[in-house]
Image (spheres, rainbow, N blue to C red):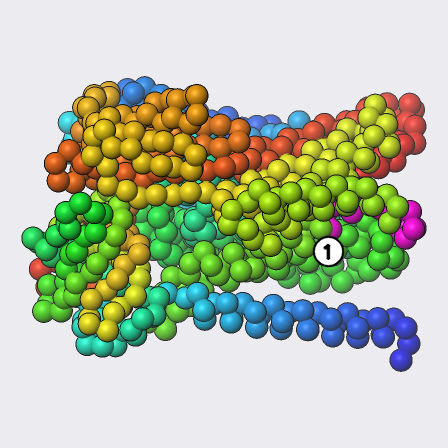
Amino acid sequence: MLPEFGQFCIALAFGLALATAVTGLAGGSVSALRLRGISSMVVGQFVFCATAFVILISAFVQDDFSVEYVAGHSNSLLPWYYKISATWGGHEGSFLLWTLTMTAWMVAVVVRRGNYPERLFSRVAGILSLVNLGFLAFLIFTSNPFTRLIPMTPADGADLNPLLQDFGLIVHPPMLYAGYVGLAVPFAFAIAALLENRVDAAWARWSRPWSNAAWAFLTVGIALGSWWAYYELGWGGWWFWDPSENASFMPWLAATALIHSLAATEKRGAFKSWTLLLAIAGFSLSLLGGFIIRSGVITSVHAFAVDPQRGMFILIFLGVVVGCSLVLYAIRAGQERAVVRYGFLSREFFMLINNVVLVVALAVVIWGTLAPIGYQLRGDHISIGPPFFDAFFVPLMLVLAAALAVVPLLNWKRTDVVRTARGAAVPLGLGIVIGLAGWYVTDPKLASVSVALGLAAWIVFSHARDLIQRGIRKVPVAYWGMTLGHLGFAMSLTGVAVTATQSIEHDVRMAPQEVEQLGDAEVRFLGVTEVRGPNYVAQQGIFVVTEGESSFELRPEKRRYLAGGSIMTEAGIEPGFLSDTYISLGEPLEGDAWAVRLHYKPLVRWVWIGALFMALGGIVAVMDVRYRRLRQRQKHPAAEKPAKEAMA
Amino acid sequence: MNPVRKRRLYLAVFLLVAVSGTTAALMVALEQNINMFYPPDQVVSGEAPVARQIRAGGMVAEGSVVRIPDSLQVEFVLTDYNGADFTVRYEGILPDLFREGQGILVQGQLQADGTFAAHEVLAKHDENYMPPELVHMAETSSPGGSQ
């Protein structure tokens, strides 16, 4: 009975979304009554989606295998926490989570409605509801998670894919979805601003916290996905340029460009129509990502089950969203013409560099991801390897890093050349020293790696000098946000450059008691024992790694899951801030020997820690007082004071 | 020309150059890094190029997997169950889902002697997933795939 109620909740949310969209977008004056109606209907959408989601979770926890989705993605042997996370382990449930996240963002907009003019808020809520209406229709018509298997109820479930039975997969999808659908909010603000003909600094200011927050979630989601692939796929890679990774990377690149471009629009009124376009592009690329992952048109290592009907639905939805937005953009954005003058040494110009680099990077990813489809239409099957992406990303990211290092010295409009040069001298010098030091330390020696290390150091010193000069106590919160984000980028850049080129990887055949050299360490294989987990049996290898005085043990596993019989590699990892030692078991060979993969991965964690700093920067920037002041001003118009222009 | 028009002309020319430059670079890089896929009959008939980076796929023939002792070298035969088959040589660790009778993809170079030197072996990721190249092949070959 409960699952039917869940389905009913989705239907009710659908009805409310329709009603909110009509109320929000209809013409006429926006009365207090209408505002209250919109707000409560948005909350209603959230409540019904949340109820449906809780019902689905309870079906998983209670092993209700009469629900097809539960039967397909769970098993009575599954530990309880994986039963809960299995709720979003497959297509239908994860899409329910997607709509729930959407409604949560909508509630957040409602909570802050006092910050915005009534008409604009009503339009934003209407557009968000319209988008949610599309999501809910997709859920109801193509992906119902509550479909029953009655009377042919299976005795037990088919089990959750073992790769998804993991902590990383508990947290990765919610974060990623919060980023994906979070981009719907700046999108809605952009469309509302176009409808209301008010693309101005105030609009940019309203849009910024939402863009930052969504971008931060997306950053964390991508980092978690990369971390998960690293330890769970078992083979030590952390980025594969796989279509499903690119699906999240494309909106991230657009969103990164957006948060920078919004800054220029807010402070200087520059790049208005460009910013609008980025807001539209960010959300459209989220939908494109959804299409790539959920339709199965592109070969991917972790795509959902192939379903052309779903792909078609998303494609049509994407077409409608992009089509309508661009038509509106074409009609209205032409009127937004501002002549903003600025010199080459100005923040505006460097924002432009940032945007050009990111958009070119975006074009590369789109091209590399979608080209196989084009070839497929011709009847050819192709795949595009990492070298294609690397060929572009290495130079592009170095250019981006170089521009980034200069940013703290720049003012809006124009900056004095001599002053800039004087300010840049010391940090740049230190950067060059570190780059040269990097050349001596690294092996193999690559110019691009030394340049990357030097640039990363330049970024760090340049921002540090800037903070000290401004006075650490006087720096506004938003400026801290920017600094953190940039330092995070420098850290990720260092991690990527070092781990991609300096890692050691050996595939070897090891018999018990054999010793292999891995960098400076010695790895001894003691043998294999059998261990039992809650729902699997594993062959557990025992390795002792000795480096100088210190030594530790690693126990990688080869697991066989009882329900599906699938085999999975569980790597043994000794994590460290400076390097990881990573061992995974291949297959048993003749005698007691095993095929073994030994990895030494320097600075691999910097890739993800840097990404977390970037995300933290985004969140810190949202905390800035000036976004809170808006509301106080609304509440006490008499107490309004001219807000002091913050720096970033 | 008035200054505004002049600026716009510069902008348009700049955009044109930038866009066409990027496109050209993308095309060149794509041509160099593209891996074409060939089913067994095209590998056998010589349609697949020799000594170029390509992908091939097929079913691992039953009883064909041979390990070379004291090494990680392995040889197996990929077949389409339709008379076309070829030998693959690989050194390294095979994926968890590598099994006889399973559809797999190999990436590497076809040798002049008709064997395939693989540097990467990809198997199905889970029960539901199969590379589209192989789905198509499983449909066209008679005793079906592994599903």
The one of A293 and A181 positioned closer to us in this rendering: A293
Quarter containing the N terminus of chain A: top left
Instruction: Using a 10 Å C-alpha cutoff, classify the residue at mark 1 as few (fewer than 14 neighbours), some (14 to 19) or many (20 or more).
Output: some
Q: Residue A595: where, in percent of width, then height?
A: 24, 40
The one of A173 and A486 positioned closer to us in this rendering: A486
The image quadrant of residue B46 is: bottom left
A41 magenta-colored? no
The image quadrant of residue A211 is: top right
Q: Secondary structure at mark 1?
A: helix
Name the residue located 28 percent from the left edge and 52 percent from the top edge: B122
Q: Residue furthest front?
A: A548
| Magenta residues (range) | A403-420
Left or right: A502 as drawn, with respect to A362: left
Q: Amino acid at mark 1?
A: Ile
Q: Residue A41: where, in percent of width, then height?
A: 57, 31
Residue B145 seen anywhere in this rendered image of the structure: no
Name the residue located 88 percent from the left edge and 35 percent from the top edge: A645
The image quadrant of residue A359 is: bottom right
Left or right: A642 as drawn, with respect to B104: right
Q: Residue A330: where, in percent of width, then height?
A: 69, 63
Check disc 1 and report the residue beneath it. A353
Q: Main secondary structure of the magenta part?
A: helix
Left or right: A463 as drawn, with respect to A496: right
Name the residue located 84 percent from the left edge and 71 percent from the top edge: B7
